[in-house]
Image (spheres, rainbow, N blue to C red):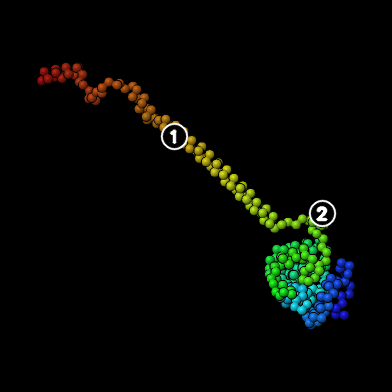
């Protein structure tokens, strides 16, 4: 009973969900110590604690021993949790091995459209994962692991179900075109460059308008200077007008010469005295 699929589970790709794992590997999982001691009576909630304790991903290692990661994958196939729970597993960013486990399960059981929509955002995750295989330990990044799920036929020593190509789904209108991050970054740079060009053109226009206003003010100031220089004060005009009526003969002394009548009168007075 411990190795049977939960009652009411739906068939995936036309077969029992546990049969997605090859028979040889599945039997080795049933015989492993981790499966017998830790995977018994696990639920969708209690499985989270076991997935958090996982320290590496992989299929089989050593003498064809299954990894704990592979045992938990088979347990997920056995209990078949709801889609909402798997999506919550996938959104747990702080637990990278739980996210990797959910990504592998989604790749094996979900429809092609859901696989692309749910796993493609994980291509932005660049965290490191430990990978254990027949040769030992190695490092792999999360985006590389997700990319292998979308492109390769065998991951973690398990044959992946057939996945429709994205181009075919786009032609059928089932999914929208995937936008590259590089293209988005280039478009963002082009937008910034266009904004810079606009600001530069606006600053140039402002400089031109300022220079034009300065030249106009200078021209007005020069003409006003000339007009002010040509204009003369009323005093200068009156002095000029008075000078017109003055004789240009040599100037005489301001003292008046005695008239002849006055001289004769003085002579008479002197004679009488």
Mark 2 or 1, nearer chain start: 2
User: Whole-percent x and y of residue 125?
Assistant: 70, 65
Q: Dots 2 and 1: beta carbons under 8 Å? A: no
- Whether residue 85 is visible here, answered yes or no, is no
Front-most of residues 208 and 39: 39
Image quarter where the N terminus lies is bottom right
Left or right of 197, for residue 262: left
Q: What element carries label 1?
A: helix
For residue 100, what is the image quadrant? Answer: bottom right
Q: Position of residue 170 (x, y in %)?
A: 80, 55
Q: Residues within 10 Å of mark 1 (few under 14, many from 20)?
A: few
Mark number, residue 171: 2
**Rendered residue at 74%/75% (across/down):** 134
Q: Distance between the residues labelled 2 and 1?
A: 78 Å
Q: Which residue lies under the disc numbered 1?
A: 225
Q: Residue at x 14, y 18 (%)?
A: 267
In which quadrant will I find the C terminus? top left
Give the residue drawn at x 26%, y 22%. Answer: 250
Q: Is residue 73 left or right of residue 225?
A: right
User: 37 above or below 252?
Assistant: below
The image position of residue 183, as x and y in percent, is 69, 55
Identified at 36% across, 26% down, the residue is: 240
Q: Which of 90 and 240 is in front in this view?
A: 90
Q: Which of 257 and 208 is in front in this view?
A: 208
Compared with residue 251, is residue 49 higher up or lower down, i.e. above or below? below
Which is more foreground, mark 2 or mark 1? 2
Work out whether residue 125 can be spotted.
Answer: yes
């Amino acid at each position: 009973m411990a190795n049977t699929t939960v009652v009411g589970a739906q068939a995936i790709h036309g077969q029992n969900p546990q049969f997605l794992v090859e028979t040889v590997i599945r039997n080795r999982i049933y015989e492993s110590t981790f499966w017998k001691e830790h995977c018994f009576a696990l639920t969708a909630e209690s499985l989270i604690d076991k997935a958090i304790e996982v320290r590496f991903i992989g299929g089989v290692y050593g003498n064809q021993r299954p990894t704990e990661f592979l045992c938990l994958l088979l347990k997920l196939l056995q209990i078949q949790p709801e889609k909402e729970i798997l999506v919550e597993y996938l959104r747990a960013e702080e637990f990278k091995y739980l996210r990797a486990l959910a990504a592998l399960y989604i790749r094996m059981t979900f429809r092609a459209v859901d696989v692309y929509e749910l796993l493609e955002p994980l291509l932005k995750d660049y965290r490191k994962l430990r990978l254990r295989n027949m040769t030992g330990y190695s490092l792999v990044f999360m985006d590389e692991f997700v990319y292998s799920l979308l492109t390769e036929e065998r991951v973690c020593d398990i044959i992946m179900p057939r996945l429709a190509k994205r181009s075919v789904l786009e032609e059928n209108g089932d999914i929208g075109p995937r936008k590259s991050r590089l293209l988005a970054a280039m478009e963002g740079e082009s937008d910034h460059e266009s904004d810079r060009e606009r600001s530069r053109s606006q600053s140039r226009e402002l400089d031109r308008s300022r220079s034009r206003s300065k030249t106009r003010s200078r021209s007005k100031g020069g003409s006003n200077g000339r007009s002010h220089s040509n204009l003369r004060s009323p005093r200068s005009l009156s002095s000029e007008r008075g000078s017109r009526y003055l004789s240009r003969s040599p100037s005489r002394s301001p003292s008046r010469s005695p008239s002849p009548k006055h001289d004769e009168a003085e002579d008479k007075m002197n004679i009488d005295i």
